[in-house]
Amino acid sequence: MKKPTIEDLVKRLNLKPLWSNDYLIEFYRSDLVLQRKIIGQSFDGDRPLFNWAYYLIPENVLCPFHLHLSDESWQYCMGGPLELFIIHPKDGRLEKVLIGQDILKGQKFIHIVQKDVWFAAKTKKNAGYTLITHIVSPAFFPQDKVKGHYDELIKKFPQHKDLIKEFAWPRDWKESL
């Protein structure tokens, strides 16, 4: 089987440009709704139980540090391995996770990023791209994302300055989501 190109995947999956030459398409949003009084005051309203999307990260494209108000499950689909960098806010611990198909080399098919942790991602060097699906529960809405700007994250986690510098959002970033 021939490995699909990025262009093949964008066309076949109807992916839309996201932040920085990466692509996303939500393909399912639950009809079941969780009330704000149940999910918490951090949300600005009720939310569907979950949503599911494809996310394509080409090599040399970064998914900058951000956090969600919801848990997010990342599932490997195809391409090369994906590196997730997770900073736990309570103790500043850095967790590195490799999502991919080679479980004998420590890669994981699925990883859950818990709510309220800072995380960033990139496709491993020489991998071309990574296609994953992710499920967010309660469902993701753009206002539920907090961007990790360099100066704010460095104050919180100075021990990770180099990594934060690589993955932090610039203050003037214009995004499509």
Image (spheres, rainbow, N blue to C red):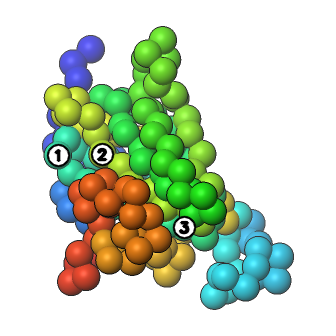
The numbered mark at residue 68 is 3
Q: Residue furthest right?
A: 38
The numbered mark at residue 60 is 1
Residue under the point 83% across and 76% down: 38
| Residue 20 placement (x, y as % from top left) | 20, 62
**Between marks 3 and 2, how big is the CA–CA gap?**
18 Å
Please tell me which of labels 1 and 2 falls first in the chain: 1
Depth order, front residue of 117/71: 117
| Residue 109 placement (x, y as % from top left) | 52, 29
Q: Amino acid at mark 3?
A: His
Asked whether residue 93 is in view, the answer is yes
Residue 167 located left or right of residue 157: left
Please tell me which of labels 3 and 2 falls first in the chain: 3
Q: Is residue 134 above or below residue 125?
A: below
Depth order, front residue of 117/34: 117
SS at mark 3?
Answer: strand
Residue under the point 60% across and 58% down: 91
Mark 2 lies on residue: 122
Q: Amino acid at mark 1?
A: Asn
Q: Amino acid at mark 2?
A: Lys
Q: Is residue 36 above or below residue 136?
A: below
- Asked if labels 2 and 1 touch by Cβ distance under 8 angstroms, the answer is yes
